[in-house]
Amino acid sequence: MPNQQTYHMTPDEFRRHGRALVDWIADYHEQIEAYPVLSQVQPGEVRALLPEQAPQTGESFEAMLKDVEDIILPGITHWQSPNFFAYFPTGASFPSMLADLLSSGFGVQGMLWATSPACTEVETHVLDWLIEMMGLPRRFLSTESGGGVIQESASSASLTALLAARERVTQYASNLTGLEGGLVAYASSQAHSSIEKAMMIAGLGRENLRLIDVDADFAMCPADLAARIDADLAAGFIPCFVSTTIGTTSSNAIDPIPEIGKICQEHGIWLHVDAAMSGTAALCPEFRWTHQGLELADSYCFNPHKWMFTNFDVDCFYVADRSALIKTLSILPEYLKNQASESGAVFDYRDWQISLGRRFRALKLWFVIRHYGVEGLRYHVRRHVELAQQFAGWVEADARFELMAPAPLNLVCFRHVGGDDLNQALIEYLNRSGEIYLTHTRLNDVYTLRMSIGQMHTEERHVAGAWQLITETAERLAADL
Amino acid sequence: MPNQQTYHMTPDEFRRHGRALVDWIADYHEQIEAYPVLSQVQPGEVRALLPEQAPQTGESFEAMLKDVEDIILPGITHWQSPNFFAYFPTGASFPSMLADLLSSGFGVQGMLWATSPACTEVETHVLDWLIEMMGLPRRFLSTESGGGVIQESASSASLTALLAARERVTQYASNLTGLEGGLVAYASSQAHSSIEKAMMIAGLGRENLRLIDVDADFAMCPADLAARIDADLAAGFIPCFVSTTIGTTSSNAIDPIPEIGKICQEHGIWLHVDAAMSGTAALCPEFRWTHQGLELADSYCFNPHKWMFTNFDVDCFYVADRSALIKTLSILPEYLKNQASESGAVFDYRDWQISLGRRFRALKLWFVIRHYGVEGLRYHVRRHVELAQQFAGWVEADARFELMAPAPLNLVCFRHVGGDDLNQALIEYLNRSGEIYLTHTRLNDVYTLRMSIGQMHTEERHVAGAWQLITETAERLAADL
């Protein structure tokens, strides 16, 4: 029960409950394969178990933990299961969890350098580390004209990049109404939905995102991009932003940044590169070809919370010219003024993001990098790519299945040759079985299964088990049809 | 050292390090008064202690924790100190920390109902609880036409509200270019800077935010609002959004929502109410007068991460008509399609926010409410208000000082009568002393000190000690001048 005097949990109660919770989480991870990967509850089932009203008096921690087991656990889809092959991975490693707990423990708010200098400086520093670790362009360094900042997600990063691009073109007018000639932006037809959402938020109009054709490998066609820009210019539009992807969500396609970058440079268009999941591959020199041409980009982002074992929310966002970003997002009311900011000697990250407030998220990146070392991170990236290549080999060798796209890294797009209905039924059976969790996409309008391999503890036996389950289930379904 | 086989921290290592970290955090909170509240490091001092490059091989947890003590701790401004009276409080209670650790432990991504039903349903449910707990309008309930969602911050909530307002007026065109007649929005001259930032982000133009005059108590003048709307309509502008505040950042002023709401209704303008810190006061029936007229609002937000002992990032954002929000923010690519979403029986919170991804933040709200109970939360709100009123009384009774604004709740704006230079010197001395941390604002262009009382463990002795330090320091400075 809460301390009756003040209702607070005392430090000693925190020690006791904290210990129990740490054990609970360790147990959960040790037993995670016993749970159905995709939650099997029906809509409303969780809510129905919760009391209609909040408790008037405090409850014990034990009661809460019991409800976590009885009510929450069945409603969890186990993203940390080694049998999770859906969407993209989201790695929550133990060192990352601990660092996040420490961040909660400090409870600081890093909106300004002055409101906790370590929160800002560790972030700037670790994001500089990553430039070296991944071979990213030096102009992204905070010690050069650029700099990195942690955003909540790639959606926020892309929106922020689009805003900076929009403002650079409109000379920081911040106002689109009455503007003559519409601003237009470009992304491939395979770009993530967050780009369209960013166009809406920025007031630029969903329809002013030109969806550029892709080649047979689902990568953006530079020739089509160039033609669309020329047509737009001729029609009086103002091209302001090109968003490219290293590793599209549907199929892990890699846009040809060198060619696209050249086109952007010719026209002075802001080039953004979204490498949300696949960016992590650049840790390994042998996969850096995916990042070719990045020195032409104005901004870049990737998410350690996807494939770099850092729990949500850490997107690393880099710009080549930080002044464009700060001019776009800075507002300085009296109550935030302070000597350090006025001296110009510090970064105030509130001017690098949408929100004012921010937690100390750099701690988890710092802990993860220090725990694994560059060596350990590379080991897992290589392992995941190897597993995916092995899986792709099995698909290729089996006449009943086919690959639907190149698999350059850790995502394999495939299907049973039996048609859309069979594949749809297949994925429903697989997911309902609770053994594995896969999601789908459409490529060339064909229903396609995505095998995304990047969960921290996924080993060969999990991938082999998945393949066995997929082939056996498909066999049974094909026989039934 | 990390496990050599896989580089992962094993569950047993996690148990051990987790236990040590929990103890470390408990110790930190027990000793927090020993640290200077405002970090005393100089720009660059933290970075200078970090190695230039990331480690190639993994380091031990002990080494990291040692660096936390040696490098991080001096660079922390202690927001959790009972002597923190700056900005607004940001409460990180132990139950909240534990819930956040559990959220990290699950590592789920709640973008869709299906990606972890409990993540969505607990959130919807607990936000409904709060409506009852705080006496908020029933139309915000998820079981009515409205609903609540957790946003990262009040900045995100206000931006989201503005977007919904903008899109409702432009009939979900998402495009401002070429629009005839500019859209305009209104907020008082005391509104938070995030409203101006939202205008920029939404492409509406910072200058199209009309800053409405305030009365002697710094609350918005409805007559001025009505006049500005009429003038804008006459000039061909389209009024689309009025942002009001319950508890402004500078002085805790409370805009007259009933009168403003009536004006908004007449003109069909979206009314947003930002109660970031002061919303929590509505837990107590005797403070609900601050929320009068809220039934006229289209959207409302308050931050449990400020004054409700829940660690950053939890802003509760409510809308009266969720369809307006969803129509604004929804985009459905193939790779996110699933049966539950298509059935229409569930909320997919990605359609209620800017980003796609989201962590399980409702857990911490759930734990905090259950741990304290309504009773415990009310106890602390009342205690903080009482302490602030006591402080205001001391200021009033001392001829050397004066109150600069009404203090309706837990923020006291005051100054020494000796003028701006003396007050500026005073705050610098106080903050440099490390004993307490205060920030300032300007009211009627007069340099004003803000005493913000809401840290969980602040007791009468802290407030009394602060007052003693303030008066003694001021006395010394006044004598020196």
Image (cartoon, coloured by chain):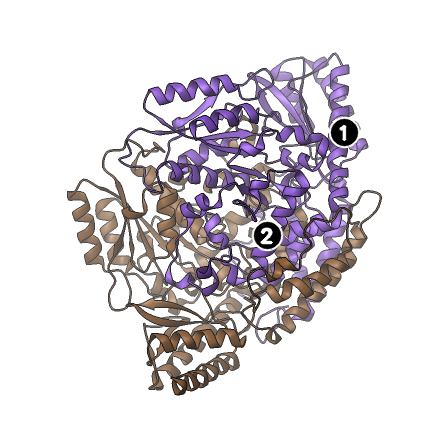
Chain colours: A purple, B brown
Residue topped by disc 2: A123
Taking the view exactly as shown, the residue that stands out farthest to the right is B5
Taking the view exactly as shown, the residue that stands out farthest to the front is A144
| Disc 2 chain ID | A
Q: Mark 2 or mark 1: which comes first in sequence?
A: 2
- Where residue B418 appears, x then y in whole percent? 33, 81
- Where residue B71 appears, x then y in whole percent? 66, 63
Residue at position x 39%, y 43% in the image: B201
Confirm whether circles 2 and 1 share one chain: yes
Q: Look at the image and tell me whether residue B449 can be seen.
A: yes
In front of the other: B219 or B83 = B83
Q: Quadrant of the C terminus of chain A?
A: top right
Badge 2: residue crowd in 10 Å (few <14, some 14–19, many ≥20):
many
Rendered image: mark on residue A404: none
Query: In the image, is residue A246 above or below residue A350?
Result: above
Of the two numbered discs 2 and 1 in the rendering, the one whose residue sits closer to the viewer: 2
User: To which quarter of the image does residue B37 belong?
Assistant: bottom right
| Disc 1 chain ID | A
Give the amino acid type for the residue marked by disc 2 in the picture: Glu
Decide if residue A460 is on the left or right side of residue B472.
right
Q: Look at the image and tell me whether residue B330 can be seen.
A: no
Query: In the image, is residue A307 above or below residue B456?
Result: above
User: To which quarter of the image does residue A405 belong?
Assistant: top right
- Where residue A448 appears, x then y in whole percent? 62, 21
Decide if residue B107 is on the left or right side of residue A328.
right
In front of the other: A227 or B122 = A227
Give the amino acid type for the residue marked by disc 1 in the picture: Leu
Secondary structure under tag 1 reads: helix
